[in-house]
Amino acid sequence: MENIKQGVVSHSTDKRGKGYPISKDLKSQILKRIREEGISVSQASKEHGINPRTIYQWLGKGITGQPTWSEVAKLKKRISMLTELVGEITIKLSQTKKKN
């Protein structure tokens, strides 16, 4: 269903089942907001009147290959930081329970 004419990359359907084109720019804006700003697919679909399945398809197509070494290193660092944070919270919770 992809159509390259005039920057149209996809189609979606409205509530009546009628299809309409979605521009490359709009698709990019929506995906950027989901990935970088953390809005939900549900929220994006409501704001733009696009079926959530369409957005999930876009997200699925964006997954390619293996992560880079720098991405892996960043994720490992983040996991370590989060693990440390969970440990600190667990200790504080345990201490609070002992006081009660």
Image (cartoon, helix red, strand yellow):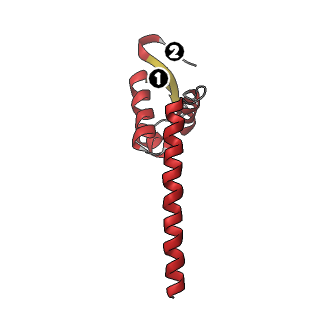
- Residue furthest to the top in view is 5
Q: Nearer the viewer, mark 1 or mark 2?
A: 2
Which of 61 and 21 lies nearest the eye of the viewer? 61
Label 1: element kind: strand
Q: Position of residue 68 (x, y in %)?
A: 53, 29
Camera-side residue of 9 and 91: 91
**Residue 26 location in percent, x, y?**
40, 28
Depth check: give the residue in front, 67 or 59: 67
Relative image position of residue 18 (x, y in whole percent)? 52, 29
Residue at image position (57%, 29%) is 63
Image marks 1 and 2: residues in contact by CB distance under 8 Å:
yes
**What x and y, as percent, mark residue 88?**
49, 66
- Whether residue 51 is visible to the viewer of this picture, yes or no, is no
Q: Which residue is located at x 48 percent, y 25 percent?
A: 20
Q: Residue at x 39, y 24 (%)?
A: 25
The kind of residue on which mark 2 rests is Asn
Q: Quadrant of the N terminus?
A: top right
Q: Which mark is residue 50?
A: none
What is the spatial separation of the Cα atoms under label 1 and label 2, in whole angstroms?
Answer: 9 Å
In this rendering, the answer to whether 10 lies above or below 33 is above
Judged from the image, the secondary structure of the residue bearing numbered disc 2 is loop
**Relative to 27, does residue 52 appear above or below in the rendering?**
below
Residue 3: assigned label:
2
The crowd level at tag 2 (other Cα within 10 Å; few <14, some 14-19, many 20+) is few
Q: Give the residue type that dot 1 points to.
A: Pro
Can you identify the residue that label 1 sits on? Answer: 21
**Sooner in the amino-acid sequence: mark 1 or mark 2:** 2
Residue 98 visible, this orientation: yes
